[in-house]
Amino acid sequence: MARKCVFTGKRPNVGHSVSHSNIKTKMRQFVNLQKKRFWWAEGERFVEIRVSTRAMRTIDKIGLHKFAAESGVDLSQY
């Protein structure tokens, strides 16, 4: 499974780590992904989804079903 948020589509960022002497080495900045169980009321069951913490906050605010509909995610797959 890719390191990608299902709802927001956030992925790792590639950049450079720059030393004091200006030597650049490649580095990756990963998204804060968490495996989380959410209660899906319409499906009357739990769904386990790998989401970013930003998406968790949005789910708390507007609800799982509405956020999934806006993002185009089919919750019956999970």
Image (spheres, grey):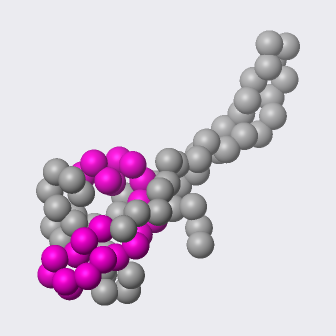
- Residue 76: x and y, percent? 31, 86
Judge whether residue 4 can be spotted in this image: yes
User: In percent of the image, x 66 and y 38: which residue is there?
Assistant: 15
Residue 34 is left or right of residue 39, and the answer is: right
Q: Which of 56 and 30 is in front in this view?
A: 56
How many marks can you see? 0
Q: In which quarter of the image is the C terminus?
A: bottom left
| Residue 74 located within the stretch drawn in magenta | no
Magenta span: 38-58
Q: Which of 69 and 51 is in front in this view?
A: 51
User: In percent of the image, x 18 and y 71: which residue is there?
Assistant: 65
User: In percent of the image, x 30 and y 81: which residue is there?
Assistant: 74
Residue 3 is left or right of residue 25, and the answer is: left
Q: Which of 78 and 15 is in front in this view?
A: 78
Q: Quadrant of residue 68?
A: bottom left
Quick check: 29 above or below 52?
A: above
| Residue 45 located within the stretch drawn in magenta | yes
Q: Quadrant of residue 9?
A: bottom left
Judge whether residue 6 can be spotted in this image: no
User: In percent of the image, x 32 and y 53: which residue is there?
Assistant: 56
Which residue lies most toward the top here? 20
Q: In which quarter of the image is the N terminus?
A: bottom right
- Residue 33: x and y, percent? 49, 54
- Residue 52: x and y, percent? 42, 53
- Residue 10: x and y, percent? 46, 54
